[in-house]
């Protein structure tokens, strides 16, 4: 009876602690990311390929990278026309501007009074892009959709993920500081990711 009473008391304390737990900033980001995943998947399933306009990760010419490998593809590209020509063909300049604008938007969102809300919206949008691309690739390639999706995220996905984590930390902080030095470092970091994305996964 004593053991049973202790278990019931422990269960009661657990339930009470769960009820008293506040909805944190991390919970908000997880909720927004999950909502984005559900929304992006639903859009692709309902509207198909047209929903993405060939999609975030579903451009042409990427099957060659899948077969040849990243290093051999880069070497071949450099032999054909040099790094400058490769960047022009890949549209790196426009991609770089787009990614830097997105990164700056995340930084600005972290400076506002409603920074958790705005960064939650950004996280939701990111979840929609990722899940939409994955859903499209799954519909197009079947069981190979997930491996191709993960491959197309490498290596720039690692850089963007780190950038998102830093910006999310700033947005959730109590003090909304500029972080100018770190911001410029993140700009360079994001630029490196855009460069890799444009050369290795050009549309």
Image (cartoon, helix red, strand yellow):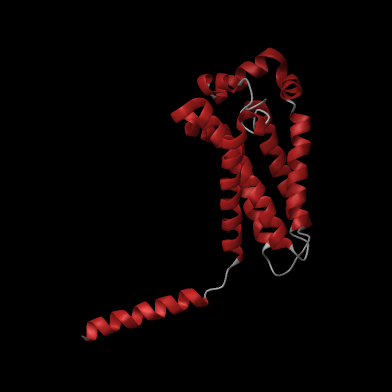
Above-or-below relation of 14 to 148: below
Q: Residue 148, can we see it?
A: no
Outermost residue on the bottom side: it is 2
In the rendering, at what x and y percent does residue 69 appear?
A: 53, 23
Residue 179 against residue 98 in the figure, above or below? below
Residue 25 placement (x, y as % from top left): 61, 64
**Which residue is at the front of the view, 140 or 196?**
140
Is 185 situated left or right of 158 in this image? Answer: right
Q: Residue at x 73, y 40 (%)?
A: 99
Q: Position of residue 57 (x, y in %)?
A: 61, 32
Q: Is residue 67 above or below residue 58?
A: above
Q: Is residue 134 left or right of residue 201?
A: left
Quadrant of the image occupied by residue 40? top right
- Give the vertical position of 104 relative to 71 (above or below): below
Outermost residue toward the left in this view: 1
Q: Residue at x 69, y 62 (%)?
A: 116
Task: Give the camera-side residue of 41 and 153.
Answer: 41
Res 70 → quadrant = top right
């Amino acid at each position: 009876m004593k053991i049973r009473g202790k278990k019931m008391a422990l269960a009661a304390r657990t339930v009470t602690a769960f009820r008293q737990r506040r909805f944190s900033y991390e919970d908000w980001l997880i909720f927004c990311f999950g909502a984005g995943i559900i929304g992006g998947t639903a859009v692709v399933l309902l509207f198909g390929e047209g929903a993405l306009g060939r999609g975030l990760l579903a451009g042409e010419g990427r099957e060659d990278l899948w077969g040849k490998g990243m290093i051999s593809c880069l070497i071949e590209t450099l032999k054909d026309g040099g790094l400058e020509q490769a960047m022009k063909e890949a549209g790196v300049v426009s991609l770089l501007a787009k990614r830097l604008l997105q990164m700056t938007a995340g930084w600005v969102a972290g400076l506002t009074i409603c920074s958790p809300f705005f960064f939650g919206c950004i996280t939701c949008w990111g979840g929609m892009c990722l899940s939409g691309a994955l859903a499209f690739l799954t519909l197009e390639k079947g069981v190979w959709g997930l491996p191709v999706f993960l491959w197309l995220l490498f290596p720039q996905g690692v850089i963007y993920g780190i950038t998102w984590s830093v910006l999310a930390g700033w947005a959730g902080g109590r003090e909304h500081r500029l972080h100018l030095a770190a911001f410029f470092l993140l700009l360079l970091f994001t630029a490196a990711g855009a460069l890799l994305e444009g050369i290795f996964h050009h549309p």
